[in-house]
Image (tube, rainbow, N blue to C red):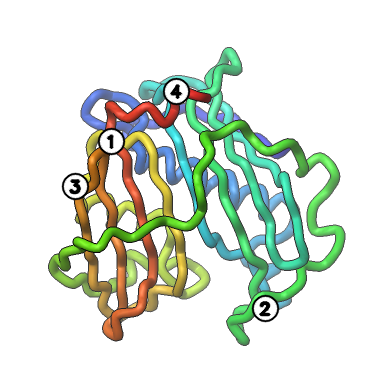
Amino acid sequence: MYSMNCRIRYSETDMTGRLSMNGLLRLFQDIGYNHAIDRNLGMEYTKRTGCTWYLLSWNIWSISMPAAGEQVTVSTYIYDYQASLAYKSIELRDALGRLLAVGDTKWVYMDIERQEPAEAPDGQWINTDFGKKAETPQTSRRIEVPDDMRMTERVYVKPYLIDTNAHGNNVKLTELAMSISGADAGCITLRAEFKRQVRKETYIYPYIADRENGVSAVFKDENGESLSVFEFIYKGDNLCGSL
């Protein structure tokens, strides 16, 4: 298990003074990147080898969001590893060790130049990077897209949305989908699939559909191909009751 201790920053909280879903996403992204850096798999590794890990999907459940100033521990570990694929759990716990939020993520090791999966070299991760899959509600990684999707105003992809791998940053794309769909206030559970890369100076065509307990969103390109698929569940749903 790889862990980091931190304090919830005021800038990461919502109007209630507690960690927002956006803030949680950033914490979960940071633990993944710090894990890579400390295993010598950061940007220098990518420049040298032309390979890196891309996030394919994440399922995230919040249980009890911490308040600004609270001390927390974020941890991540691999629970399954197959050639070019890695499956990782992420946990957020308070100072007493109580589980506050949990995530299930899927990654692919990519050759950036060829844009193809590549088999990850042995020895990238040490034995302590592995653990048992975190307990989460049973749900599919494949997100069902409703038939009644409606298109909203297209979005021009500015540099703000792009990360060091020259494509859309997964956290910022998810935040954009939450904002467009109105899920940025009250979302307690989210799922996301990242199917194709979002490039700078192109357009995203967002589609949304209301659900009984939340909202779905799909980002498409100019040809109608799906780039990303999202599902946001609002407060009041009991998905986290089994955790």
Residue 71 to residue 103: above or below: above
Tags 2 and 4 in contact by the CB under 8 Å rule? Answer: no
Q: Which mark is residue 241?
A: 4
Q: What is the quadrant of residue 207 in the picture?
A: bottom left
| Residue in the image at 65% along x and 61% along y | 42
Q: Position of residue 183 (x, y in %)?
A: 24, 44
* Residue under label 1: 234
Residue 11, x across and y down, in percent: 32, 36
Per the model, the C-alpha gap separating discs 3 and 2 is 38 Å
Please name the residue that numbered disc 3 is placed on: 182
Is 168 positioned to the left or the right of 235 in the image?
Answer: right
Which numbered disc, 1 or 2, marks the residue that appears first in the sequence?
Answer: 2
Q: Earlier in the sequence, mark 1 or mark 4?
A: 1
Q: CA distance from mark 3 to mark 1?
A: 10 Å
Distance (Cα) linking label 1 and label 2: 40 Å
Front: mark 2 or 4 = 4
**Which residue is disc 2 drawn over?**
50
- Return the disc, 3 or 2, that comes first in the chain's sequence: 2
Q: Mark 1 or mark 4: which is in front?
A: 4
Of badges 3 and 1, nearer the viewer stands: 1
